[in-house]
Image (tube, grey):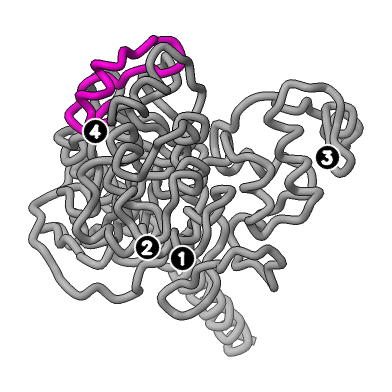
Amino acid sequence: MKRSQRGYILVQALLLVAGLLAVLAILMNNQRTSMQTLEYRLQQRRADAAANAALQQGIGTLAAANINIVTQNDAWAELGNAGDEEYDMSDGSTFRMQIVDTGSMIDLNTATQAQLTDLPLDPDQIDSLLDWLQTSTTPRADGAKSDYYNSLTQPYNAKLGQLDTLDELLLIKNWTAQTLYQPPVDPTNQLDWPNDKLGNKLPLAALVTIHSGAPDTQASGAARINFDTTRVTATQLRQLGLNRFTASQIAGHAFTSYSSLFAVRGMNLTYAGELLNVATFSTTTTTTGKFNINTASAAALETIPSMTSDVANAIVQQQTSGYETLGAVANLAGFTTRSLGAIADSLTIGSNTWIVRAYGQNGSASTAIEAVVGMRSNQIQVISCNRLHTVQIPSWWDWDQQTTSNVQAGTTTQ
């Protein structure tokens, strides 16, 4: 009997020990998980700090930008080597960055129906976007106004105003994340849609923005002459190089566009180039929706009505040296005064708004940020800052996975 009791006690003891070991294993696993969680959180904080360091460096560089002439040879354009340069921090973090001129992109807030038709969008997406932006309460044939959105399970109203973020597009009828962030499938438009570095079609997000702006000034920063409200004298015009006859055709008359101005009798490309440098048809000091001929891609330029692919490519070929005046575009081969006038109102050489792309990484944690940064009232400002929900470099940034150079960049603030 005693032997049986001792056996029972031994079994109970073994069970108790096994239970304690199981509890200990659970505690150790929980502690290990907790330590891993804490380590990841520390890595995430460091990745955040690295991305913010990249953003601050970009902002600091843009503060010195000359908004009247913005080219690919500027300090901001070379910073980060278009995401191909990696900055190493002393805490093991790294960051990469790129600054993009929004004047190189298609502004969806100002794009016309003709421009939108050149994008890989269906007619119902175009109609729905225009209905969302414009104040009319009558929907287009394939569009939607508040009546449609109010009938949804989670109802809301149509914006009837400009987009504030790209992701707001996902609220619009027939617009999806695939529309924005996935390569287009068999685009039916006539535009030669650009490819990424791997030869795949770039997603729409790579070419569009909802922020753009350029100062309506001469290359020197001086004010332009408003040919719509100012009755320019023949003497002023002859100072620009116009002959007496052409100057007399313009003097004292109002014009609303380069197209109408360049239709004046006696106009030639030399005179047109001089007028491009000084003329405006608006009282505003800033323009939106224009393309910077120093930075815009051929695909973006081709969305301008009347812009041919040959002219778009000719413009892009001169971007390495850069355009110091808007009138320099008149020297490109293939232009007539009529064809130049048809596209000139969509062109500029300046910009006051950029997108800063910043990617920070530490261990397995990463942070991707897109910030819109603009020069407003002679001060550089962050207009919007969006932390992207992705653990990888966003595909529409079109960065190589591997960098080609490294820079020691100091420390981050955690």
**Could you tell which of marks 2 and 4 lies nearer the N-terminus?**
4
Residue 223 colored in magenta in the image = yes
Crowding near pointer 2: few (<14 within 10 Å), some, many (20+)?
A: some
Bounds of the magenta span? 217-242
Query: Which amino acid lies under the numbered mark 3 shown in the image of this protein?
Result: Gly
Q: Quadrant of residue 187 in the image? A: bottom right
Among the two numbered marks 4 and 1 on one chain, the one whose residue lies closer to the N terminus: 4
Q: Position of residue 85 (x, y in %)?
A: 20, 65
- Residue drawn at point x = 29 percent, y = 53 percent: 331
Q: Please, is residue 36 above or below residue 233 in the view? A: below
Query: Of discs 4 and 1, which sits in the foreground?
Result: 1
Residue topped by disc 3: 143
Amino acid, disc 4: Asn
Q: Is disc 4 in contact with disc 1, using a CB cutoff of under 8 Å? A: no
* Numbered disc in front, either 3 or 4: 4
Identify the disc placed on residue 314.
2
From mark 1 to mark 2, how far is it between C-alphas?
Answer: 6 Å
User: CB atoms at circles 3 and 4 under 8 Å apart?
Assistant: no
Judge from the rendering whether residue 143 lies leftward or rightward of residue 165; answer left or right: right
Q: Can you identify the residue that label 1 sits on? A: 310
Q: Residue at x 68, y 63 (%)?
A: 189
Q: Secondary structure at mark 2?
A: helix
Q: Which mark is residue 68?
A: 4
Quadrant where the C terminus lies?
A: top left
Q: Position of residue 299 (x, y in %)?
A: 50, 60
Q: Going from the N terminus, do you reach mark 3 or mark 4 first? A: 4
Q: Tell me the kind of residue under disc 1.
A: Asp
* Amino acid type shown at disc 2: Ala
